[in-house]
Image (tube, helix red, strand yellow):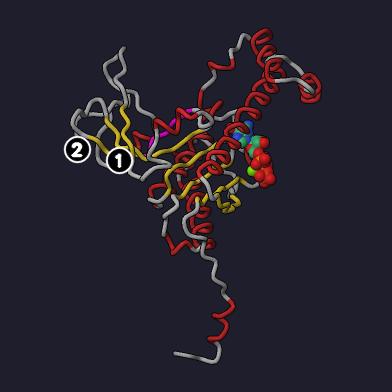
């Protein structure tokens, strides 16, 4: 019924369009993941499958939203950076936020079995979401530096803490006391002297978090083929080098190039599982060593 007497209620829906020409950051964070990690027996301090499941869900979001130029994840959180010019959903904040958050969550649940084939999902996880706007490129870089510094601080602490508890036989309380007031150098020293661990050799995904970028990607076994893929990187975003090497992020956005190099020992290339899965969707075959075979 056109123009019913009820229609005036539409006027209560306010315009929530985001300012033009500004960086839009959507950050999602797992609700009560302390409990969720315990219920699913995640490895401490880092569960590689849990992190890869987060990365997998983030790839789903990036495949859907072409305006995302970079995503960054750590622990139970992910940040999605939309380019300044993004016009998706006419920049309506609630649409963007709710769609990103729900797609991330459903992909997390949908792909649970890919990463935990022998573990039952005990209950439905949920994620909160927020939108933060950053006017300048420097603000955006500082935001990402803030999140990456957070990974470093938390991961160094957690790595020492869980070594003290799991290998050093301390109680949680004793480990906490041992670490109170220590600086980074002290923590590195404890790791090295007590457990023979050089922090810098720990999996870069744990130390740096995961950066996802869209790249025109060269696959070693497919010499003449470049495919646009979302690739994981574990680089330092705090340094200028990262922004120079991936100049497309702040520049005129056109995915940059990336090359996976051949693995010297077995002539095949070990591609990240996340990349393999995207290639399989494009109908490339992979063998049991996960090297990519001749096209289609
Ligand atoms: N064991 C383990 N736990 C993890 C891992 N990743 C995240 N977590 C847990 O998830 C928590 C994430 O921190 P927060 O987001 O601050 O805590 P939260 O319990 O999710 O609380 P809210 O976000 O406020 O709902 C960490 O403190 C860990 O307990 C992992 O790889 N292994
Ligand atoms: Mg959380």
Q: In the depicted view, which residue is nearer to us: 101 or 142?
A: 142
Mark 1 secondary-structure assignment: strand
| Left or right of residue 284, residue 82 in this image | right
Is label 2 in contact with label 1 (beta carbons under 8 Å)? no
The residue at the point 45 percent across, 40 percent down is: 56
Residue named by callout 1: 228
The residue at the point 58 percent across, 28 percent down is: 46
Q: Mark number for residue 296?
A: 2
Q: Is residue 234 magenta?
A: yes
Q: Is residue 203 magenta?
A: no
Mark 2 secondary-structure assignment: loop
Marks 2 and 1: which is nearer the front? 1
Q: How many marks are shown on the rendered structure?
A: 2
Find residue 170 and report its horizontal and vertical position in percent: 76, 18
User: Dividing the picture into quarters, in which one does residue 14 lie?
Assistant: bottom right
Magenta-drawn segment: 230-235
| Left or right of residue 228, residue 233 in this image | right
């Amino acid at each position: 019924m056109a123009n019913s007497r009820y229609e005036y209620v539409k006027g209560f829906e306010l315009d929530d369009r985001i300012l033009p020409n500004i960086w839009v950051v959507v950050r999602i964070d797992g609700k009560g993941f302390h409990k969720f990690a315990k219920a699913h027996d995640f490895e401490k301090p880092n569960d590689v499958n849990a992190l890869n499941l987060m990365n997998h869900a983030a790839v789903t979001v990036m495949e859907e939203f072409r305006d995302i130029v970079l995503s960054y994840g750590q622990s139970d959180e992910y940040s999605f950076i939309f380019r300044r010019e993004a016009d998706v959903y006419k920049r309506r904040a609630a649409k963007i936020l709710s769609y990103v958050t729900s797609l991330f969550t459903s992909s997390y649940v949908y792909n649970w079995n890919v990463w935990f084939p022998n573990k039952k999902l005990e209950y439905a996880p949920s994620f909160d979401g927020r939108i933060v706007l950053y006017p300048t490129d420097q603000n955006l870089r500082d935001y990402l530096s803030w999140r990456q510094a957070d990974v470093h601080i938390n991961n160094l602490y957690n790595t020492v803490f869980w070594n003290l508890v799991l290998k050093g036989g301390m109680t949680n309380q004793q480990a906490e006391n041992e670490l109170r007031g220590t600086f980074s150098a002290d923590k590195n020293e404890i790791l090295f002297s007590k457990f023979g661990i050089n922090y810098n050799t720990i999996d870069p995904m744990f130390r740096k978090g995961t950066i996802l970028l869209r790249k025109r990607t060269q696959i070693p076994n497919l010499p003449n083929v470049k495919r646009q893929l979302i690739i994981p990187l574990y680089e330092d975003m705090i340094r200028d080098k990262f922004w120079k090497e991936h100049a497309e992020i702040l520049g005129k956005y056109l995915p940059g190039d990336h090359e996976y190099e051949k693995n010297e020992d077995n002539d095949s290339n070990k591609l990240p599982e996340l990349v393999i899965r995207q290639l399989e969707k494009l109908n490339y075959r992979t063998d049991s060593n996960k090297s990519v075979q001749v096209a289609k």
